Image: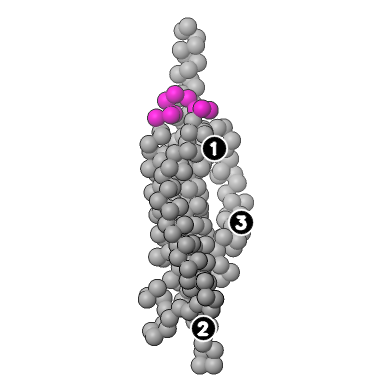
Amino acid sequence: LKRVLPEGDKLIFTNLPEMFFTYLKVSFVAGLLAAMPFIFYEIWMFVAPGLYQKEKKFLIPFVISSSILFVGGALFGYFVVFPFGFKFFMSFANEYIKPLPSVKQYFAFSTKLLLAFGLVFELPVATFFLTKMGLVTDVFLRKQRKFAILLIFVAAAILTPPDVITQIMMAGPLLALYEISILVSKLAGRKKEDSEKEKEEKDSQA
């Protein structure tokens, strides 16, 4: 907060219960972040029955990678993107107009970025499971790249505050994550084919 606010400026609150509810919201977000490993574990347990026995060994890697990606995305959004977006809006101040951001607005702005980046950083993990379920392939993702680029910028416009800087800063990592997802899909697809071939060989021997 000290890094993004102009020297001498402070946040304000205009409603009496505003700070109280802000503390509650901060506690909720902190609890959500702390609970992410358990949430991803429950998601895995929901998906696991549809996987082969060999694929179920990915439980621990899934929980760890999902948690790291979510927290990493949230930290990237808060410490990298948020300062740029905040300073961008504050830059519209002049000698006649002084910004007075409230605690509520600050929290809403930062939380939206934090959760949005945390979720979009899960793209490689989501791609892995969609590939395992046979819903997507690396070939399909390559063919749809131009449409994906369009959707990424649309998603960035929806998930981030309405300024070009934060939208571009979200779209950039998303494009990189999409390319990583193509690689993940390719590797997951190969492993799935190997598992199916091995199963067919065992069935034929039986």
- 10 Å crowding of disc 3: few (<14), some (14-19), many (20+): few
Residue 150: which disc?
Answer: 3
Identify residue for label 1: 130
Q: What element carries label 1?
A: helix
Image x and y of residue 180, in percent = 46, 47
- The colour mode here is one colour
Q: How many marks?
A: 3
Q: Majority secondary structure of the magenta segment?
A: helix
The boundaries of the magenta stretch are 49-57
Q: Which picture quadrant has residue 65?
A: top left
Callout 2 amino acid: Pro
Image x and y of residue 110, in percent = 48, 66
**Where the N terminus falls, by quadrant?**
bottom left
Whether tag 1 and tag 3 are in contact, CB under 8 A, the answer is no
Whether tag 2 and tag 3 are in contact, CB under 8 A, the answer is no
Residue 57: which disc?
Answer: none
CA–CA distance in space, label 1 to label 3? 21 Å
Q: Can residue 102 be seen in this view?
A: no
Image x and y of residue 131, in percent = 53, 36
Q: In percent of the image, x 50 and y 66: which residue is there?
A: 21
- 10 Å crowding of disc 1: few (<14), some (14-19), many (20+): some
Residue 99: which disc?
Answer: 2
From the viewer's perspective, is the residue at label 2 or at label 3 nearer?
2
Q: Does the magenta stretch include residue 13?
A: no
Q: Is mark 2 on a helix, strand or loop?
A: loop
Q: In percent of the image, x 43 and y 53: which residue is there?
A: 31
Give the mark nearer the N terminus: 2 vs 3.
Answer: 2
Callout 3 amino acid: Leu
